[in-house]
Amino acid sequence: MLHHSPLIATIVGSLVFAFMLGTLAFRLRLPPLIGYLCAGIVAGPFTPGFTADSQIAPQLAEMGVILLMFGVGLHFSVRDLLAVKTIALPGAIGQILLATVLGLGMSQLLGWPLGEGVVFGLALSTASTVVLLKALQEKNLEQTDDGKIAIGWLVVEDLVMVLTLVLLPIFAGVLGGKGADTVISGSAVLWTIVLTLGKVAAFVALMLVFGRRFLPWMLERIVYTGSRELFRLAVLSTALGVAYGASLLFDVSFALGAFFAGMVLAESPLSHRAAEESLPLRDAFSVLFFVSVGMLLNPSVLLHNFWEVLGTLLIIVVGKSLGAYGIVRLFGRSPATALTIAASLAQIGEFSFILAGLGIALGLMGEHSHSLILAGAILSILLNPLLFLWTERYRKRQPALASNGKAA
């Protein structure tokens, strides 16, 4: 007798709906990503028919984040990261501050408490790892200078969000959440910041000193066995094991842990083979990420709170993009580069959901603002491929415009 399994049903249902609607989107000359998001809406709890497990799906999606960041790390060196630090570090921090201020401003117009506005703004400030990397890969921008700036910017954003998740419970009382009567000392805040940054630094040092030697050595020993199956298993266990260990021991996000695991392996001659072996699972689990995001959307929010959803979307797509564009141009980069970075960051995703969930747990955020973040995330992810398409057309026109100018 067959027994119902939520895990199997979620995987099968999600992939089947994603395949059908992704194919339909492709036939309509739309990015398949749009079909994957629609598959999530169909499989979600807010539409009739088949309903996937909304607790299991995000956990499966996290696997996609890990494998994607691991794959990026395999094509990214420490030198690449340091090369973009002068623009990625101030750019990411500046854009986070701008988006947070815009979100806080909108919250004040709506009469929300200060704490809710702060969390709302922070949630709108950070881009989705999966969406950004998918877009760069589809446009073959991952290994370009523009792609490296976008990835470096993303790494800084992730580090800032790790620190935010640690500090938010401390400031929850001051912002009107749980523990409002708790007195916070400056030394306690400083110690928390130092401890968090110290954990991140310890993890990075461990990977660069020990991991840089051990991980390539281990893969070489596995290659000598002649077993492709063992090599594939070694690659996957490295990506997942380092990501999980980084989260468990150093409070570093799965994405950053996997990224550094890939980056230390990038110096190995086996890095290209490791990337090929992890590609099929990487693609499958990244599809599950988009399905899990689609499952979060309650379509009624779009009807009942249209203007608030529109305001949220404008902050994400217009406010963040203009801010990123301006920052990149201030550093002397070309308009084409600035547009690519702006399009890359004109969406929000997984860290936004985590931050909003923490805000609810701390009593800083209500379900209404949480719903706006979810709606803004899904709509911005839907629009992101179209922004990249427009950016790509602009880049293709640049040589023509330049030649016309010379002819004149």
Image (spheres, rainbow, N blue to C red):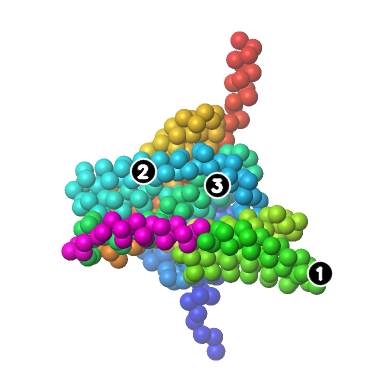
Q: Between 30 and 126, which is closer to the camera in this rendering?
A: 126
Which amino acid type is marked by label 3? Answer: Ile
Name the residue beneath numbered marker 2: 97
Residue in the picture at 51% in, 75% down: 7
Name the residue beneath numbered marker 3: 151
Quarter of the image for the C terminus: give it. top right
Q: Between 167 and 362, which is closer to the camera in this rendering?
A: 167
Gap between marks 2 and 1 measured at Cα? 50 Å
Across and down, in percent, residue 111 comes to 18, 48
Residue in the picture at 26% in, 42% down: 105
Which mark is drawn over residue 224? 1
- Graded by Cα atoms within 10 Å as few (under 14), some (14 to 19) or many (20 or more), the crowding at tag 2 reads some
Please check the rendered image and state whether residue 296 is part of the magenta-colored stretch, yes or no: no
Q: Helix, strand or loop at disc 1?
A: helix
Q: Between 224 and 380, which is closer to the camera in this rendering?
A: 224
Q: Looking at this rendering, what residue extends furthest in the bottom direction?
A: 1
From which residue to which does the magenta span run? 180-201
- Graded by Cα atoms within 10 Å as few (under 14), some (14 to 19) or many (20 or more), the crowding at tag 1 reads few
